[in-house]
Image (tube, rainbow, N blue to C red):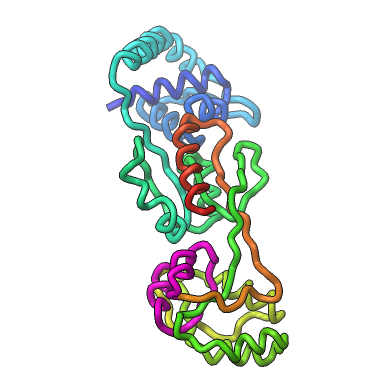
Amino acid sequence: MVNLEWFRTFKTIYDTGSLTGAAASLYISQPGVSLHLSSLESYVGYKLFDRTSRKMVPTERGKILYNYILDPIGKLQEAEEFFYKTTQKEKSTISIGMCFETFQFTLESYLPTLPFNVIIKFGDYPEMLSDLHNGILDLIITPQKDDSKGVVYKPFFKERIVLIGGAQTPYTSFKNLVKQKDLSGIQQWLKQQTWYGTTGDMEHLRRFWYLNFGKRPDFRPNYIVPNMSSILRCLGGGTGIAVIPDFLSKKELDSGRVRLLWEGFRKIENTLYFGSRKKTMYAAEIRMIEEIFEKEMV
């Protein structure tokens, strides 16, 4: 069965002259526009546009179809606008990309209070950036950004990568080594400890080690757990060490379940950004999410 949205997309491509223009006008991704067009062409059985490097040029059959649907589509849009104002507004849905720990620390407890639907997607940052550009995600929380003109990045927080230890971890000798700046002694002490890591790529540990000792770590954590929240639960009140962002361990540090052992001779700071498309129909919803993060990460 034909999907009426295919005709709306076809008309918008015809009016704007490009897939990009249609995507911007309809607030959907360009791949979504291409899918609608190819589905309609398969349904009617012939090409509707000739694709050139600069413009989508309608074929003769495309012109005929456009003239057939112009008035009906216009009537449907008028009806949509009229009845939309007289009926209850449906809940909007926005999609947000971030790492699991950031979600758990900031947004998770607020979900039941939000007046709109939310889809959370976890993944690596390059994948999130791609999904944002393609219209799959509406907002991302990321320490990475690119130079895309269609996306705006707003800095809101600086995280520091630090070495933490369980409350029972003996650290007096380590503090003396740090005070003396004994790099060899510090490395030897660290390698003798019980390390916790995640199933991820351990980027934090590698960066921390390289900046302070000029080389990559030549060991792996003793225990690999699913995420940093697991690390904090394992360390809580016990022994062991890990390298993680400071804001994730704020509650445990305040309660004394873990302690800050070392920030490093060369401190690592990452700026976290809100990333969203410049043209979005969810500006109000996105701003509400941003306010939650700004409140929780002060």
Start-end of magenta stretch: 229-257
Residue 78 x, y percent position in the rendering:
38, 10
Look at the image and say whether residue 170 sits in the magenta stretch. Answer: no
User: Looking at the picture, does residue 28 appear above or below residue 196?
Assistant: above
Rendering quarter of residue 159: bottom right
Q: Seen in the image, is 4 located left or right of residue 129?
A: left
User: From where the camera sits, is residue 99 visible?
Assistant: yes
Look at the image and say whether residue 251 sits in the magenta stretch. Answer: yes
Residue 289 x, y percent position in the rendering:
46, 42
Residue at 35% x, 51% y is 109
Residue at 41% x, 10% y is 74
User: Looking at the picture, does residue 145 appear above or below residue 231?
Assistant: above
Residue at 42% x, 78% y is 235
Rendering quarter of residue 93: top left
Residue 127 x, y percent position in the rendering:
51, 53
Decide which of 27, 281 is in the foreground and name it: 281
Residue at 37% x, 47% y is 110
Decide which of 4, 269 is in the foreground and name it: 269
Which image quarter is the N terminus in?
Answer: top left
User: From where the camera sits, is residue 33 visible?
Assistant: no
Residue 108 x, y percent position in the rendering:
37, 52
